[in-house]
Amino acid sequence: MSHNKVAKIVKITLISLDTIIRQSLLELYVSKIISLNFLPLFSTLCHNIRIFVGKDTKILHNIVIVYQFLVAMKQYIELQVACPSEEIAEIITAYLADYEFESFDTIAEAEGVTLYAYRKSEEWESCRNEAIEAIEEFGKVTSESEIEDENWNSTWEAESFQPVEIDNSIVIRAPHHPAPTPSTIDIIVTPKMSFGSGHHHTTRMMCRHILDCKASGRALDVGCGTGVLSIAALKCGAEWVDAIDIDIWSTESAREAAELNGISDKMEIILGTVEKIEGRTYDLIMANINRNIILEDIARYEAALNGGGTLLLSGFLEGDVEDILAATNALNLKLVTKLQEEEWVALKLTK
């Protein structure tokens, strides 16, 4: 069905509704309705609004929120890439992160490892060839498939996730693991389709930076994933954290983790981009994302960072450091510490 026909359905349905609410519903992306095969559901939704809601704007608002949530539950692309070594898999991970792959896993094979990479299927075709060409030099794509998004917590537990210990100071664990000693910072997470269970080099290095900088005041966690860095900052002394991510499963994971760790009253979880925090300022900003996003948003980080504040950056490789530092130097951000695990790097800067 064409976009015009769908738009006509919406307009007919909303004839009796007031202007403000009509506009909010018409702003839903018609292309998403078609591409996700939600048109039958949308038609039913419109029918029910017309019959049962009338001008009850509160009910209509709730229906719109539910519908937007359904639209956000997209399918994922799964790539399987044969890699000669774990180190090569790490390099491919960095490349794929630039093409909006947001979750990764590796499985050791008789020869090398298999890298599993996931991203939303929306707009994959527009960058597919470029992404695959970018990694062909390092590994071979052995499988490409579309999978339904799901709650990955049960799979994660079934695969015997082990707690992560960082410098005898922080333990990241699942709820079913025993608690560490009282002197250890205890972080409990139940990851879904999100990044940040603590096993990756970048998460561990960022936690080390947080321990070192003795967090205080207000903090921002950009690309929060499961919320590990937000929780670490709060348990290391920060008074408040804004945690932001573009992925709905990540924000739900972070919200669940905040409750598990008893810090929900000190944390706001935001679905969207860093533009959502414009006008707010912070004493600590943490961005464990990837090179391209950091370079795109670095000016926003600097603008939001209080004088004397700390900026922690990771999610990129040693080969990216020169470009990152060129951008931070242009904004008069000073490099304090550089951590590195294999090819991955985490930087601590001050304003």
Image: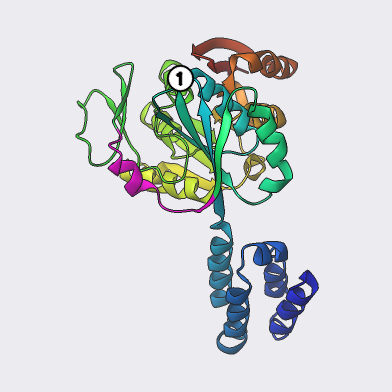
Left or right of residue 165, residue 191 in this image: right
- The spot of residue 243 in percent (x, y) is 51, 40
Name the residue at 58% across, 63% down: 68
Name the residue at 54% across, 15% down: 343
- The spot of residue 206 in percent (x, y) is 47, 23
Name the residue at 53% across, 67% down: 66
Whether residue 82 is visible: yes
Whether residue 283 is visible: no
**Residue 136 magenta-highlighted:** no
Look at mark 1 in the image and give the residue it sits on: 205
Looking at the image, the residue that sits furthest to the bottom is 51
Q: Nearer the viewer, residue 257 or 153?
A: 153
Within-10-Å neighbours for mark 1: few <14, some 14–19, many 20+: many
Left or right of residue 108, residue 182 in this image: left
Looking at the image, the residue that sits furthest to the right is 4
Q: Nearer the viewer, residue 147 or 328?
A: 147
- The spot of residue 237 in percent (x, y) is 39, 27
- Residue 282: quarter of image: top right
Q: Which of 157 and 252 is in front in this view?
A: 157
Q: Quadrant of the C terminus?
A: top right
Mark 1: amino acid:
Met
- The spot of residue 27 in percent (x, y) is 72, 65
Name the residue at 57% across, 57% down: 72
Placement of 182 over or under 58, stated as above or below = above
Stretch of the chain drawn in magenta: 146-161
